[in-house]
Image: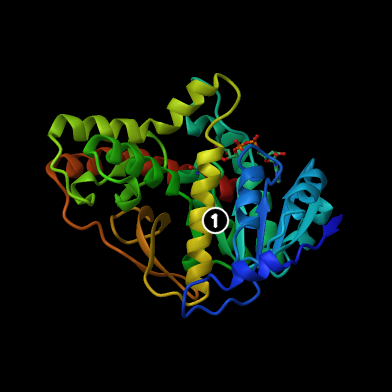
Amino acid sequence: MFRSVARSAAGKHLLRRGYATESVPDRKVAVLGAAGGIGQPLALLMKLNPRVSRLALYDIANTPGVAADVSHINTRSEVTGYVGEEQLGQALEGCDVVIIPAGVPRKPGMTRDDLFNINAGIVKGLCSAIAKYCPNALVNMISNPVNSTVPIAAEVFKKAGTYDERKLFGVTTLDVVRAKTFYAGKAKVNVTDVNVPVVGGHAGVTILPLFSQATPKANLPEDEIKALTKRTQDGGTEVVEAKAGKGSATLSMAYAGAIFADACLKGLNGVPDVVECSFVQSTVTELPFFASKVRLGKNGVEEVLGLGPLSEYEKEGLEILKPELKASIEKGIKFANQS
Ligand code: NAI
């Protein structure tokens, strides 16, 4: 096990820059799959987060190097690297938030569902360990297919008797990040001012950006809204093809994962009105899991927010996505219960 401590004047300074009324307690965050394409930049971004006091980096290989590297950054958190299954328990013990980008990414021509056979087993194993070593942690699931891996995690936790639906999140933030960027480009507005909810799931047509609710308002014509919707749904594939066999989105995903984990930490620390989109247990539709805006609080999900008013095009999109999302959820549940 690799261990190093980095506490410095710069780290303490960052601490004071938190939300005005926020307490900044000790918070342990683990990244599982930390030596991967997403894991490495995500480890870097979590090291820069002043809300983190301990950062546990776990992978089945190569974590000591990543941990040594990241640990030299002079920010608040103490970084520890863990490698191999026998160190997984130590990585997880005492965690407040566990981020999971472990597993194989897509290659050109693959759908996220094509990853199921490998990633379902990885996620199942990691979640069994979470149930054992940090059953109260908030789990941020990045591993694809998110539409199935989140239901798998829920089943594993139910079997272990630790399931708390407020604490399990499918990370769909990258869809929101893309929708914001693409919308800002078309609407010619400042991207940092843009908000776009993205609901449904995290694969192809199950990704439903609600551009009718985008702010600042731009009144884009229908054909541009359709093109933006398609580009948001295919954003992952755009990156997979551009990388031509060298993986899927890693840098933008690390950014999105860091934004979402930070929102979870803010909620835990009592910052009010923290709202992000996420794929969670839900009654917003008839499906048991669904992505929509959620308010985050001291116990994870405080409130799952409704869809709000939809355009006719979005209403159609919602009906189109339901059968695929339902099948992916059922596939995950079946896998978790059969083996
Ligand atoms: P990668 O192959 O570069 O890294 C994956 C890492 O997971 C590797 O370091 C590998 O050693 C590790 N790993 C494998 N089995 C493990 C286990 N049992 N325990 C711990 N670590 C394990 O892949 P990349 O690009 O980082 O993608 C990771 C996952 O994230 C993929 O499933 C990908 O589809 C997904 N993803 C999700 C997105 C989202 O929006 N939710 C966006 C982009 C990717």
**Residue at 30% over, 52% down:** 193
Question: Which corner quadrant holds the N terminus?
Answer: bottom right
The answer to whether residue 188 of the structure is visible from this angle is yes
Q: Nearer the viewer, residue 104 or 258?
A: 258
Question: Is 285 rendered above or below residue 226?
Answer: below
Drawn side of residue 82 relative to residue 122, left or right:
right
- x, y percentage for residue 157? 59, 62
Is ligand 1 closer than 8 angstroms to the Cβ of mark 1? Answer: no
Q: Residue furthest right?
A: 1
Return the x and y of residue 176 as percentages of the image width and height: 37, 47
Q: In which quarter of the image is ligand 1?
A: top right
Q: Position of residue 279 (x, y in %)?
A: 42, 53
Q: Which amino acid does label 1 sit on?
A: Asn
Residue sitting at 55 percent across and 39 percent down? 251
Per the image, the residue denoted by label 1 is 140
SS at mark 1 in the image: strand
Q: Which residue is drawn at 20% across and 43% down?
A: 314
Q: Nearer the viewer, residue 239 or 18?
A: 18
Q: Is residue 191 left or right of residue 174?
A: left
